[in-house]
């Protein structure tokens, strides 16, 4: 359970502000021309930083180390919002004041309109060891150099006025329903959660397309190659950097700007370390295999092994392609054994499992 039996907890939902009026049934813009897609894209990219600031402010306000388990998911309009279960009771009035006072300033160089576009992009200059203007050959300022000229933030992100706060008791039926609501979207992709599946309408796809078009020209970090479209060299720029092409998830259409983790858990939520969680997962898998009568291949069990790094002079080390193929085959075998164990333990007594049919 997410909280001890009958211990007070708080269920919280945080959203972003409005970018324009939307249709009630499809959550798409009524007037795409006036809908603020640019602010929607920037808010989505900087939403994780806003959440971090919220938890900092909350802990400072209440005076204790607030612990939480939360999930980030998109609304149908494409904007991310956050559901969280908080251990302990926090007055609604206090939470609403904290939310209203929380904001995040983005002290980045201005990036309202791209300076360069396809066909006219900055070029790498070997002598200057940086990117230069394609017409004048003048070296572009670096990200840090551009930041030195700032006198105001490039963007400020706030939470919206729509806030849901509810006190619940851990261990109750109501708590179970809220936990189910908290986790129901984790089996879906961001696009599916936003309704952008095979049942999406043309209007919904066009709304998402406009948002993605803005995300493509919005930098996601100081190292983002999209900065070159705005006449700024990103941190770590190299000759292999392609202007405007960033591999970050924030720019992918299926992510809608939600680039980070969708599950956010405070470090002390479970009072366990990462090693504890890994040990529990290992024990669970082994017990599942044992209950199903499946014995892992030799080498999977713990044993008296001595691990050491290979040296370039070692003659008994297989080539890297062979090692990669062996690792892939091993992972596939483990997954097959795990799936077979799940089917075996979930099958009712006297029923044949899918693996039994295959074996027959």
Image: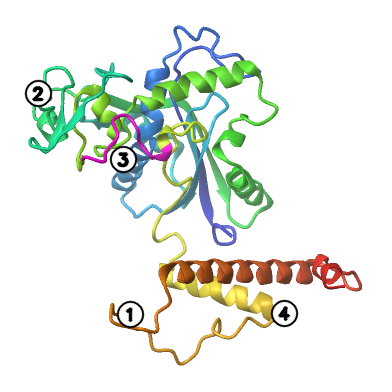
Q: Residues within 10 Å of mark 2 (few under 14, many from 20)?
A: few
Q: Distance between the residues labelled 1 and 2?
A: 48 Å
Q: Eyeballing the image, is 95 above or below 85? A: above
Q: How far apart are marks 3 and 1 (CA)?
A: 45 Å
Q: Name the residue under label 4.
A: 291
Picture quarter containing residue 298?
Answer: bottom right
Closer to the camera, 93 or 188?
A: 188
Q: Is residue 241 magenta?
A: yes
Q: Give the colour scheme shown.
A: rainbow
Quarter of the figure that contains the C terminus: bottom right
Picture quarter containing residue 353?
Answer: bottom right
Q: Earlier in the sequence, mark 2 or mark 4?
A: 2
Q: How crowded is mark 4: few (under 14 residues within 10 Å), some or many (20 or more)?
A: some
Instruction: Give the magenta-colored segment's residue range.
Output: 239-249
Identify which residue is drawn at 90% across, 69% down.
351
Q: Earlier in the sequence, mark 2 or mark 3?
A: 3
Q: Name the residue under label 2.
A: 138
Q: Is residue 178 visible?
A: no
Which-is-in-front pick, marks 2 and 4? 2
Q: Mark 3 points at which residue?
A: 53
Q: Does the CB distance between marks 3 and 4 fall below 8 Å?
A: no
Identify which residue is drawn at 45% across, 72% down.
276
Residue 121: x and y in percent read 25, 23
Which-is-in-front pick, marks 2 and 3? 2
Q: Earlier in the sequence, mark 1 or mark 2?
A: 2
Q: How crowded is mark 1: few (under 14 residues within 10 Å), some or many (20 or more)?
A: few
- Kindly state the secondary structure of the residue where label 2 is placed: loop
Residue 134: x and y in percent read 18, 21
- Kindly state the secondary structure of the residue where label 1 is placed: loop
Q: Earlier in the sequence, mark 4 or mark 1?
A: 4
Question: Is 46 on the left or on the right of 300, as rendered?
Answer: left
């Amino acid at each position: 359970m997410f909280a001890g039996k009958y211990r007070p907890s708080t269920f919280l939902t945080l959203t972003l502000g409005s970018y324009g009026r939307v249709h009630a049934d499809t959550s798409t813009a009524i007037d795409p021309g006036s809908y603020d897609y640019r602010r929607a894209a920037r808010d989505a990219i900087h939403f994780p930083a806003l959440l971090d600031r919220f938890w900092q402010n909350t802990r400072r306000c209440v005076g204790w180390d607030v612990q939480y388990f939360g999930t980030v998911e998109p609304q149908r309009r494409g904007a991310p919002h956050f559901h969280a279960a908080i251990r302990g009771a926090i007055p609604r009035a206090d939470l609403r004041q904290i939310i209203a006072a929380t904001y995040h300033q983005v002290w980045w160089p201005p990036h309202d309109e791209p300076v360069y576009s396809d066909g006219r992009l900055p070029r790498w200059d070997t002598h200057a060891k940086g990117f230069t203007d394609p017409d004048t050959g003048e070296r572009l300022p670096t990200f840090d150099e551009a930041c030195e000229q700032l006198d105001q933030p490039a963007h400020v992100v706030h939470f919206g006025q729509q806030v849901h706060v509810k006190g619940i008791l851990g261990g109750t039926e109501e708590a179970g329903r809220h936990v189910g609501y908290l986790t129901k979207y984790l089996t879906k992709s961001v696009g599916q959660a936003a309704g952008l599946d095979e049942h999406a309408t043309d209007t919904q796809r066009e709304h998402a397309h406009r948002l993605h078009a803005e995300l493509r020209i919005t930098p996601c970090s100081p190292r983002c190659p999209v900065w070159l479209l705005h006449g700024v060299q990103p941190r770590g720029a190299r000759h292999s950097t392609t202007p405007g092409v960033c591999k970050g998830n924030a720019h992918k259409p299926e992510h809608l700007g939600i680039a980070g983790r969708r599950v956010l858990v405070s470090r002390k939520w479970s009072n366990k370390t990462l090693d504890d969680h890994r040990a529990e997962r290992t024990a669970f898998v082994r017990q599942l295999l044992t209950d199903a009568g499946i014995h892992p291949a030799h080498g999977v069990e713990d044993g008296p092994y001595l691990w050491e790094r290979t040296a370039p002079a070692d003659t008994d080390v297989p080539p890297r392609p062979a090692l990669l193929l062996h690792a892939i085959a091993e992972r596939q075998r483990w997954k097959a054994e795990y799936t077979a164990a799940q089917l075996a333990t979930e099958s009712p007594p006297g029923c044949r499992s899918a693996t039994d049919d295959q074996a027959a």
